[in-house]
Amino acid sequence: MTTIPEVLFVCVHNAGRSQMAAALLTHYAMGRVAVRSAGSEPAEKVNPAAAAAVAEWGLDITAEVPSKLSTEDVEASDVVITMGCGDTCPVFPGKRYLDWQLEDPAGQGIDAVRPIRDDIDRRVRGLLAELLDT
């Protein structure tokens, strides 16, 4: 890995799961991890329920803009975490890939998104502990 580990979160629309994960890891890592997120078919804006769920914890993702997954994003990352993007994520030797099976928050209200946020939070904390323990 590079001096500072680089993590890429990927989901289809880059509007919910990957945005929440990126915000949480950025918050907890405090500059010790480079964080990016992208989607195979990016939405026009961040999912409002996902934004509301992380806002309950003091994080603001409303200004984030969903972005298209690129080969360069994957190449630059040490760890690539997919969240339902299927086989659209390019695979490169030497990268660590994790697939987090998470419910899609698209079209759901805040009550349904909170458990998804909480699951992402647990996984992000575990990942951060692994990355900083090496």
Image (cartoon, rainbow, N blue to C red):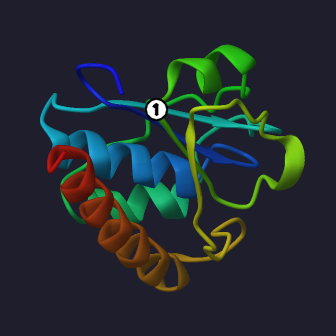
**Residue at horizontal 63%, vertical 69%?**
105
Pick out the residue farthest to the front: 94
In the image, residue 31 sits, relative to residue 20, either above or below, namely above
In the image, residue 83 sits, relative to residue 76, either above or below, namely below
**Residue at horizontal 25%, vertical 63%?**
125
| Front-most of residues 77 and 124 | 77
Pick out the residue farthest to the right: 87
Residue 21 appears left or right of 60: right
Q: Which residue is mark 1?
A: 78
- The amino acid pointed to by label 1 is Asp
**Residue at horizontal 51%, vertical 76%?**
113
| Front-most of residues 53 and 79 | 79
- Give the percent coordinates (x, y) of residue 35: 38, 32
Residue 35 appears left or right of 90: left
Give the quadrant of the N terminus. top left
- Give the percent coordinates (x, y) of residue 73: 61, 21
| Front-most of residues 50 and 123 | 123
| Front-most of residues 88 and 49 | 88
Q: Dividing the picture into quarters, in which one does residue 75 lie?
A: top right
- Give the percent coordinates (x, y) of residue 89: 78, 40
Circle 1 residues within 10 Å: few <14, some 14–19, many ≥20: some
- Give the percent coordinates (x, y) of residue 19: 49, 46
Per the image, label 1 sits on a secondary structure element best described as: loop
In the image, residue 37 sits, relative to residue 16, either above or below, namely above
